[in-house]
Amino acid sequence: MKRLLTVASLVVAGLPFLAAAPAVTDPCALPDSAVDGERKDYLRLANSCVKCHADVTAEHQGSAHASSWTDPLVQAAIKADPSKADGCARCHAPREILDVGIGKLPEARTTARELGVTCITCHMKKNDYFGPYTSKGHGGVEASAFYRESTMCAGCHGQPEARKEHEQFSSFLKGPAAKDGATCQSCHMPEVTRELVTDPKIRPEFKIGAVPARKHTFGGVRKGSLLAQAAALGVEPSSEGWRIGITPKTGHALPASYGRRVRLTVEQRGDGEKPLKTDVFDFVAPETALAPGVSSTHAVAKVSGVVSAKAVLTHHAQVAPGRDAEEVGVIATLVLPVGN
Ligand code: HEC
Ligand code: HEC
Ligand code: HEC
Ligand code: HEC
Ligand code: HEC
């Protein structure tokens, strides 16, 4: 029955490439998003939230969620193979996550895709609003516990079958942060105490007052960088030179996404211009990514004539269609003792 419906809606949508399309192996490439039930007034509704929730909106606008469809890398990939657009839209321009259920792969939106992941995506189902508090806003909202749980993010960030390249859950679930009760929100939505509405015209009887809330900045590696919190470097001397220790502090693998590389560079200098020796250790997702909470040590031999030495841990977003040069960010730097 479901299959018949899917076929029927595709015929209605009149997608021309389907007849000749080969068997689909990538589950997220399945263009089975229903067109029925789509909001007609998406743009207007999405743009209305700023009036009463100005600070949340400003944070969200600066985040990768707001640019998840206009992202030049996403657009470059879709330009190369337009038949993938509907599959990508399931997470990059999705319909309401509550339509399918928390933690499940969302459906694709057909309208206002340029808005990416929006307030409506995470907070609405039909005409009802959902949030973490019990409030009188929007005709009365009952608190929903899932806003404080990591599963909230899993529909898009935890789909190893649909998109293992951009999946943070498998390593998160095995790591110490999850065991200690931390959530994705703990690190990616910083705490702030504030009122939920910024519009001064809203009368006090409709407000719950200032409450512990969370910023919608969703910092990562690209916008609102969290790299300075990603790992710590340590050093102990060895008979040959040094043992450099890396302790990841992320809740998940580091790096946490394909196309990323973390690099330890150890540079030894003498009196001259050029370094005497440079050692490089690469950690690439997924095979050699650093597991969360697991420290590793990397031995470096000291060369004679060394005057100064330092270790630098960097994060690299690799060259891809839409990204002409590697983007490099510094995680940590450590001056190494050279002795005498
Ligand atoms: C990716 C999902 C996601 C998106 C997109 C999103 N939110 Fe939220 N929102 C959350 C989560 C999770 C919480 C709960 C945070 C907490 O525990 O306090 C929340 C909380 C809130 C709250 C209540 C308290 C607070 O933190 O201020 C308001 C109001 C809110 N969101 C409005 C918005 C508006 C307006 C937008 C669009 C500009 C938006 N949200 C976009 C996930 C999202
Ligand atoms: C299951 C949900 C899902 C689907 C389907 C999906 N993505 Fe993503 N994508 C994500 C998430 C989550 C991120 C952010 C996390 C990350 O970078 O690992 C992301 C990030 C990206 C990035 C940024 C990578 C970078 O190096 O900065 C690109 C480009 C991208 N996706 C392209 C696509 C394209 C093209 C498609 C369709 C062929 C697609 N995605 C389908 C969830 C998805
Ligand atoms: C203990 C803090 C912490 C927790 C918990 C945490 N993260 Fe992160 N996350 C970070 C830090 C720090 C970075 C930046 C370094 C990096 O790239 O991994 C990051 C990076 C990311 C990135 C960018 C990935 C990349 O390598 O390009 C995504 C996406 C992300 N986190 C999603 C999540 C999701 C989803 C969860 C919950 C399953 C989560 N995070 C839990 C700290 C955390
Ligand atoms: C005319 C003003 C107004 C507009 C426009 C508005 N809201 Fe609200 N919203 C409120 C009020 C009032 C509250 C309750 C505040 C309180 O209890 O302190 C609220 C609360 C919320 C909450 C928290 C609910 C809870 O109990 O946890 C969310 C989430 C939210 N709004 C989302 C949105 C989204 C998404 C939009 C746009 C589609 C939007 N709001 C547009 C006035 C507005
Ligand atoms: C409806 C799908 C969806 C949901 C739900 C969602 N995200 Fe995302 N998220 C994305 C997509 C798509 C991107 C990649 C945007 C891009 O192209 O750069 C992204 C990007 C991010 C980034 C930036 C990663 C970077 O490369 O810097 C962080 C951090 C993040 N999300 C955290 C979260 C957290 C925490 C939650 C749960 C509260 C969550 N997301 C819920 C789809 C989603």
Image: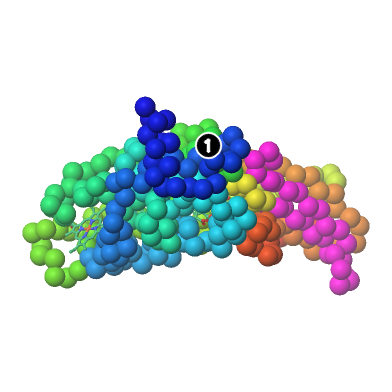
Residue 119 on image: x %, y %: 33, 56
Q: Residue at x 62, y 47 (%)?
A: 258
Q: What type of secondary structure mainly makes up the magenta span?
A: strand
The front one of 192 and 242 is 192
Q: Is residue 36 visible?
A: yes
Q: Amino acid at mark 1?
A: Pro
Give the left or right position of residue 206, taking residue 83 as reference. left
The front one of 87 and 300 is 87
Most distant residue in the top direction: 1
Query: On the image, numbered disc 1 is attached to which residue?
Result: 27
In magenta, the rendered stretch is 262-288
For residue 270, which quarter of the picture?
A: bottom right
Q: Residue at x 37, y 27 (%)?
A: 1
Work out which quarter of the rendered image holds the C terminus and state it: bottom right
Residue 114 on image: x %, y %: 43, 62
Helix, strand or loop at label 1? It is: helix
User: Which colour assignment does the render follow?
Assistant: rainbow
Q: Is residue 287 above or below residue 123?
A: above
Residue 173 on image: x %, y %: 49, 34
Is residue 279 within the magenta segment? yes
Q: Is residue 180 above or below residue 117?
A: above
Q: Is residue 29 visible?
A: no
